[in-house]
Amino acid sequence: MKTGTPVRIDGRSVHYDLMETQDGENDFHRFSFMSEPRKLKQLQCWTCFTNEEVHEILRKGLPDSPLFNGQIQSIGPRYCPSIETKIVTFPDKPQHQLFLEPEGETTQELYLNGFSSSLPMDIQLAALKKVPAFKDLVVYRPGYAIEYDYFDPTQLKHTLESKIIKNLFLAGQVNGTTGYEEAGGQGIIAGINAHINCHGGEPFTLGRDEAYIGVLIDDLVTKGVDEPYRMFTSRAEYRILLRQDDADMRLTERAYKLGLVKQDRYEHLCSKRETVSRIIDFAKTFSIKAALINDALESLGTARLTHGCKLIDLLNRPQITIENIAGHIPAFKALLDQITDRKEEVIEAAEVLIKYQGYIDRERMIADKIHRLEAIRIKGKFDYNSLNSLSTEARQKLMKIDPETLAQASRIPGISPSDINVLLVLLGR
């Protein structure tokens, strides 16, 4: 397979006034609920676009591109193509968006996301100088492409131990994936199981309903790969269960049992879980009188009550949040005021569980339906090329393979659970 990287730019040579700024976010969300707020300064990014002049120079340079002259014959990542692949695959597009991203607080080096390329440096530079913001461009390093070998991941167990060579665990790009998170996710599972393999214990795996790591590894070892694999939410059939707000609820206890999480972190989780349950239980049992809340409801832009109801019924309205209604219900505010540790995080977790319960139940029903209909025959029933509700990738692969059954279709690499749901809906019609 092959992968690539874009040009690195000297920020002092860029005309920032000719680009649009993209500001970052400053909220309480972090990769870990246990980490402290970051001390790094939040830096701006910028966006601009290629144009026809850029594309013309790139087209003239294609004979010198290893991707198009036969030097590199391997398959690249579908979801982050090189700029030359973009102009060949989408010849009708007059422009492609580029993102200019700083590499760090104390460097002038910028990363040009969207301009991955294996073309010679002089062609990359000549093309980029046709972008107004880059007319005086100076670069540190050009973009480049590399080829890499991988092992067929269907020869792995779910623990990422080789079926062929006992005691050998494989993780990362060598399993046919692309991307940092994909590699890291495999690394921790392979590392855990390598340790268990040496010291004893039950093999450790994560299910498709427990973590995206579980989806990633199950896809790799069950379906194999025919192009560099990247993890997407659409690959998971239980993605409403795999939310960012409950990652700790899903995985901390499992890590604690492995000895990867210390006691204080586990106790923190138990405290959070208990507080979230207290908020939800209060909302389910606390009764609201119409006369006492109607003025507040009107001020929040939602309909008045004609009779009393439970607090949870109000929280299910899109205009109502725990935060904006609490001030109008003294008993509820008193309960929330007792939360002193990571209050925003706890309230978000409770609110998601209240507002999305119906969606969660519906997802479970869809999953059960897929299991029941998994052997339905679909060969000859669809003209896949005309099904615009399927992704381009799904249409291409279904036309190529023409699977006998829905079960076979679901095992084709690149066919996501949402594509299978589309076929289920059409079968129902």
Image (tube, grey):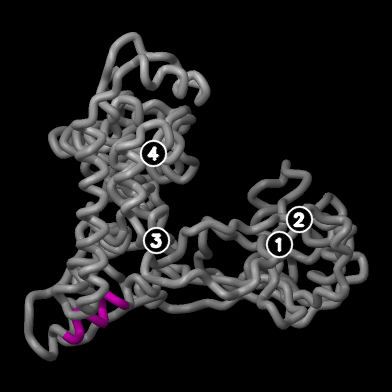
Looking at the rendered structure, which numbered label has been put on residue 142?
A: none
Q: Which residue is mark 3?
A: 226
Tag 1: residue type?
A: Cys
Is 257 within the magenta?
Answer: no
Describe the element under mark 3 as helix, strand or loop.
loop
Closest to the camera, between mark 3 and mark 1, is: 1
Using the numbered discs, state the Cα–Cα distance from disc 3 to disc 2 in whole angstroms: 38 Å
Q: Position of residue 45 (x, y in %)?
A: 71, 62
Q: Mark 2, residues whose alpha carbon is within 10 Å: few (<14), some, or many (≥20)?
A: some
Q: Which amino acid does the dot numbered 2 rest on?
A: Thr
Instruction: Measure how far apart labels 1 and 2 are at the Cα level.
Output: 6 Å
* Most distant residue in the left direction: 201
What separation in Å lies between label 2 and label 4 (alpha carbons)? Answer: 33 Å
Q: Quadrant of residue 36?
A: bottom left
What percent of the width, then of the height, locates residue 113?
66, 64
Residue at image mark 2: 21
Name the residue beneath numbered marker 1. Answer: 45
Given contact means CB atoms under 8 Å apart, are the residues at marks 1 and 2 in contact? yes
